[in-house]
Image (tube, rainbow, N blue to C red):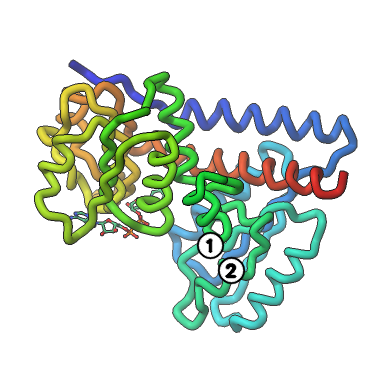
Amino acid sequence: MSANILDGKALAAEIRTQVARAVKQRVDKALSVPGLAVLIVGGDAASQVYVRNKRRACAEVGFNSFAHNLDGNISQIELLSLIGALNSNPDVHGILVQLPLPAHIDEEAVIERIDPAKDVDGFHPYNVGRLVLRLPRLRSCTPRGIMTLLARTGVNLEGMDAVIVGQSNIVGRPVAMELLAARCTITICHTRTRDLPAKVRAADLVIASAGRPELVRGDWIKEGAIVIDVGINRRDDGSLVGDVEFDAARERASWITPVPGGVGPMTVATLLQNTLQAAEMADALIS
Ligand code: NAD
């Protein structure tokens, strides 16, 4: 058996087209153009690339993009007060602060300063809590993008045994809550998990998000399982590799995401969906 490829690049392009169409419709109805503020503080080369991609994606769908390239030495108070100003700016519907932040800035305080109604990354405890309570509002981009990819398979997830490798706040935990809400039975694995291969072997659905190149071996994959590879790891030669041993896993899985071209493009497309959603939520408040 050779798995079907879940093509995140193609699906992300479809989503961008849908969002661009929705922006045109808003303009035709004299509604506001969605606006996204992307803040970067100093920033390593990888963060600069992510931010550039996000701003470009905004421009392509017709959003207003508010760029804030901040000095790496900015004080926490200055950063919090900028976020406060963006919270009050009606042209800004979404606020994204690129992580990680420099060590002198308290990441939690920054996330909590963002108005939850503009928290398009879905990292604010309010939005995380709503997801836990099955009352999702703005959902974290990578997990929501994964759910969109899974919907594309047409496979009913109810009752599936889902194993998530990784328990981070931005991927493992929220994707576990998404899958629980979709009525999967979830197992969250981490560095202290005993016998990871056995956990994965029992899974109908595997989410690999450990950030360890090819940690999940192909022969761990149950015949017919769905495999979502979130990992992005750079090899010495500069090429990218996921957390799953792709070629071997593909022989056993029913569906699998490639790296690159799987989850990655969905994250940026979902950010656009979230920003559009935030603009629609703002309309509902003023109508
Ligand atoms: P993280 O380092 O914050 O978390 C990794 C998790 O994996 C931890 O909970 C850790 O306990 C677990 N883990 C690590 N090694 C393990 C092992 N050997 N066995 C079991 N568990 C193990 O990472 P993160 O921010 O969640 O990102 C994970 C990966 O996903 C990275 O490669 C990152 O680049 C990628 N990522 C991709 C996207 C995307 O859009 N495609 C988005 C976010 C993160």
Residue 240 lies, in percent from the top left, at 30, 44
Residue labelled 1 has its Cβ within 8 Å of some atom of ligand 1: no
Amino acid type at circle 2 is Glu
Q: What is the crowding at mark 1: few (fewer than 14 residues within 10 Å), some, or many (at least 20)?
A: few
Residue 183 lies, in percent from the top left, at 39, 34
Q: Is residue 173 above or below residue 63?
A: below
Relative side of 106 to 171, left or right = right
Q: CA distance from mark 2 to mark 1?
A: 7 Å
Which comes sooner in the sequence, label 2 or label 1?
2
For label 2, the residue is: 112
Q: Is residue 140 visible?
A: no
Identify the residue at image location x=78%, y=31%: 24
Amino acid type at circle 1 is Pro
Q: Residue furthest right?
A: 30
Element carrying mark 1: helix
Please name whichever residue, 136 or 106, is drawn nearer the observer in this view of the structure: 136
Labelled disc at residue 40 = none
User: In the picture, which quadrant includes the N terminus?
Assistant: top left
Image quarter where ligand 1 lies: bottom left
Please name whichever residue, 146 or 195, is drawn nearer the observer in this view of the structure: 195
Q: Is residue 213 visible?
A: yes
Give the label, 2 or 1, closer to the camera. 1
Element carrying mark 2: helix
Q: Is residue 252 above or below residue 271?
A: above
Q: Quadrant of residue 178?
A: top left
Identify the residue at image location x=30%, y=29%: 256
Labelled disc at residue 125 = 1
Please name whichever residue, 221 or 213, is drawn nearer the observer in this view of the structure: 221
Please name whichever residue, 212 or 43, is drawn nearer the observer in this view of the structure: 212
Identify the residue at image location x=60%, y=58%: 96
Badges 2 and 1: C-beta atoms under 8 Å apart?
Answer: yes
